[in-house]
Image (cartoon, helix red, strand yellow):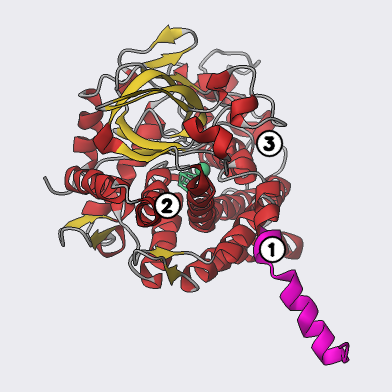
Amino acid sequence: MALMTAAQYIESLRKLNTKVYMFGERIENWVDHPMIRPSINCVAMTYALAQDPQYAELMTVKSHLTGKTINRFANIHQSAEDLKNKVKMQRLLGQKTASCFQRCVGMDAFNAVYSTTFEIDEKYGTKYHENFKQFLEMVQEEDLTVDGAMTDPKGDRSKAPHGQEDPDLFVRIKERRADGIVVRGAKCHQTGSVNSHWHIVMPTMAMGPDDKDYAVSFACPSDADGLFMIYGRQSCDTRKLEDGADIDLGNRKFGGQEALVVFDDVFIPNEYIFMEGEYDFAGMLVERFAGFHRQSYGGCKVGVGDVVIGAAALAAEYNGVEKASAVKDKLIEMTHLNETLYSCGMACSCEGKPTKCGSYMIDLLLANVCKQNVTRFPYEIVRLAEDVAGGLMVTMPSQKDFDAETVVGKNGETIGDFCNKFFVGNGSCSTEDRMRVMRFLENICLGSAAVGYRTESMHGAGSPQAQRVMIARQGDLQGKKELAKRISGIK
Ligand code: SF4
Ligand code: FE
């Protein structure tokens, strides 16, 4: 099979028996559920753009395994050019969806597992790399979306996995059989899990000998027996359940998705295992996955930032203040911050180097600096967007009020007439368009999309402290001391 179309991707989800729970109940037709569908549309965009001649060159690449054309989301990076194109692709998708399009976690997991399994095999004579290549070939051939699942619940953060009172708080091998393993545990806030055909599970931190049963990585279908998901709610999510909600949603078509993924004794056949007890490689796998995903944020959040800046500029125009120098300066500042993030995403890609197996890895220090900036700049961009747009983005009446024909005025005016009269802008746009841009900003600054643009910028791919640990490790302070000593004449 070649590349899937967006429609084929959506249909392929219907064929899965993925078990999804929301508000305490199983959702049978989750593909058409109004709270879930926008997130599916986002992933579908990764398929649609690959079919679009305008973007096909960026969105597709030749597989290094088979030579066939594949979606770049299933690629193992073969050069610094590949790394840069990955970031450019993510910026493009951010621009097209103004949301988290989810498919990157799988891509980043592929690249981390590919290079790490090679090095595990080199040391232990295992055959994980071969297992993984077989799996990846299937993913590329069938153009699948795969969730990269790393974050365990962790329970008492002061204790290692084996030291937890409840042994299930990190995904673990519960039983070893001749033909595979049985795993138990859960992965938290999993981006795109419901919308993925398969999951790749990885350990969440560096581990010691006592955590052998927790040093496990594998692939399993999203509808495997014993696997289910409990959907995460987002701010203002039930607006999506309202009849005729359109403008009030801000972003009607697209959105992100996170869920708790539970592994309630799931059997994993040997051929899908990529690590089984090699605890000394857990840290490498985590560092590489996190590094790739920290690079990713220098693309996706920048693309969303482009849309935020555009929306703020539109709001200024509709309010009639676009020529005010203070407003212009705020838009410049937003652009400066956004492009700084992009520069970091590009820089860690340009400085990419081959790993032992030949696949390319980003510069880890620069990728961590990239993500550290992402924990800050989108917050400032959003602050400036709210500043420019004005308070109306959170105080205006509902679309139903704008549409209401109930007569309330002494001269026969309706509720809608009053709304349209008093929320008029500078005359260059309809009141409805002004309302649309305000609601869009509300969605991204405070509504359901804020999950992706704000809190995910803080905690996704690791919270700020995780990057600071890596920056400390990679920053070569000793080398810098030597520089100072040499020039200042200290022996
Ligand atoms: Fe991709 Fe960004 Fe979402 Fe991560 S947060 S899955 S990099 S869009
Ligand atoms: Fe993320």
Residue shown at the point (59%, 19%) measured from the top left: 415
Q: Which amino acid does label 2 sit on?
A: Ala
| Measured Cα–Cα span from mark 1 to mark 3 | 22 Å
Please name the predominant secondary structure of the magenta segment in the image.
helix
- Which residues make up the magenta segment? 471-491
Q: Is mark 2 on a helix, strand or loop?
A: helix
Query: Which quadrant holds the C terminus?
Result: bottom right
Asked whether the residues under the numbered discs 3 and 2 touch, taking CB atoms below 8 Å apart as contact, a structural biologist would say no
Q: What residue type is labelled 3?
A: Leu
Residue toward you, 114 or 148: 114
Q: Which residue lies furthest to the top in this view?
A: 25
Disc 1 within 8 angstroms of ligand 1 (CB)? no
Look at the picture and state if 294 lies above or below 483: above
Residue under label 1? 333
Q: How many residues crowd around disc 2 within 10 Å: few (fewer than 14), some, or many (20 or more)?
A: many
Instruction: Residue 428 in the image: state x and y as whole percent.
Output: 55, 51
Residue 9 relative to residue 305: left or right: left
Residue under label 2? 112
